[in-house]
Amino acid sequence: MFIAMNRFRIAAGREAEFIEVWRTRDSRLAEVPGFQRFNLLQGPSDGQATVFISHSTWDSAVAFEAWTRSEAFRAAHAGAGQSKGLYLGPPQFEGFEAVL
């Protein structure tokens, strides 16, 4: 099993807008071989930004990497970067292999 996570810093006060972007996007993940599950996690706010994590579970790192090279990936990310001031910097990716 492989866990893929992206950490986002979202401008304070714009959390609902960010959630709506994710809620309405055409992710196509259900069509992707090896995809298991997705969650969008909301974390703490420091008054300037709120942390969100996109968390997806895959059969393997190979399945995840194949998705990143797919048409489904390009379609899901077609609107990335269109919301000025929403994101406070680029997302930070972390990938993990399950060992237990």
Image (cartoon, rainbow, N blue to C red):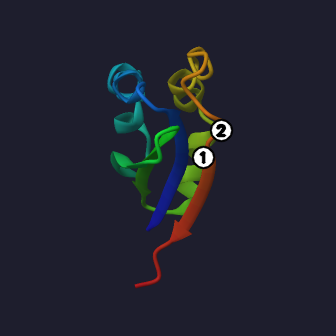
Q: Looking at this view, is 79 or 30 the one in front?
A: 79
Say which amino acid is labelled 2. Arg
Residue 4: horizontal and vertical position, in percent?
Answer: 51, 55
Say which amino acid is labelled 1. Ala
Label for residue 69? 2
Label for residue 95? none
- The relative height of residue 100 versus residue 75 in the rendered view (above or below) is below
Q: Secondary structure at mark 2?
A: loop
Looking at the rendered image, the quarter that the C terminus falls into is bottom left
Local packing at callout 1 (Cα closer than 10 Å; few below 14, some 14-19, many 20+) is: some
Q: State which quadrant residue 86 falls in.
A: top right
Local packing at callout 2 (Cα closer than 10 Å; few below 14, some 14-19, many 20+) is: few
Determine the residue positioned at 59% across, 14% down: 82
Determine the residue positioned at 52% across, 38% down: 48
Does 67 sit left or right of 35 as displayed?
A: right
Looking at the rendered image, the quarter that the N terminus falls into is bottom left
Residue 63: horizontal and vertical position, in percent?
Answer: 53, 53
- The relative height of residue 3 versus residue 30 in the rendered view (above or below) is below
Q: Looking at this view, is 15 or 68 the one in front?
A: 15
Residue 95: horizontal and vertical position, in percent?
Answer: 57, 61
Determine the residue positioned at 52% across, 29% down: 72
Query: Taking the image as drawn, is residue 43 in sight?
Result: yes
Q: State which quadrant residue 29 falls in.
A: top left
Q: Which residue is mark 1?
A: 66
- Residue lying farthest to the bottom in this orientation: 100
Q: Looking at this view, is 18 or 80 the one in front?
A: 18
Marks 1/2 in contact by CB < 8 Å: the verdict is yes
Q: Secondary structure at mark 1?
A: helix
Q: Looking at this view, is 10 or 30 the one in front?
A: 10
Residue 27: horizontal and vertical position, in percent?
Answer: 42, 29
Query: Taking the image as drawn, is residue 34 in sight?
Result: no
- Residue lying farthest to the front in this orientation: 47
